[in-house]
Amino acid sequence: MEEPAERLIPVEETADIPEEILRTEIITGARSPLTGEPLTAAEYAQLQEALANPVEPNRVSDDIRYLVFLLQLRRAVRPILPFIR
């Protein structure tokens, strides 16, 4: 029960854009990763540069760093000396 070729309806091809062309497309609009507001390409590049190179790295005070070291040391010694609370 084959139908004649004249009766078959051709399937229309969808207008898919090839991946190679999509990869070369220049993106001119973007959204801020911090607030989600629309940015131009120049503003987005400026924001990415500012986020990549922070002005002052986060710094922990020496006292807190020493306390964390003591807590880690205490945790390491506790299995050996169980009477330490």
Image (cartoon, rainbow, N blue to C red):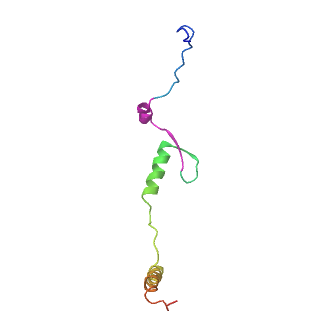
Q: Give the position of the N terminus as an image quadrant.
A: top right
Relative depth, front residue between 71 and 75: 75
The answer to which image quadrant residue 77 occupies is: bottom left
Q: Where in the figure is residue 69, as x and y percent of width and height?
A: 43, 81
- In reply to whether residue 20 is colored magenta, the answer given is yes
The magenta segment: 18-32
Q: How many marks?
A: 0
Q: Where in the figure is residue 47, as x and y percent of width and height?
A: 48, 52
Residue lying at 45% horizontally and 36% vertically, measured from the top left: 26
Relative depth, front residue between 52 and 55: 52
User: Residue furthest toward the bottom?
Assistant: 83
Residue lying at 45% horizontally and 79% vertically, measured from the top left: 65
- In reply to whether residue 64 is colored magenta, the answer given is no
Residue lying at 54% horizontally and 8% vertically, measured from the top left: 4
User: Residue furthest toward the front?
Assistant: 1
Q: Where in the figure is residue 50, as x and y percent of width and height?
A: 45, 55
Check the image and report above or below for 38 versus 50. above
Check the image and report above or below for 24 versus 9. below
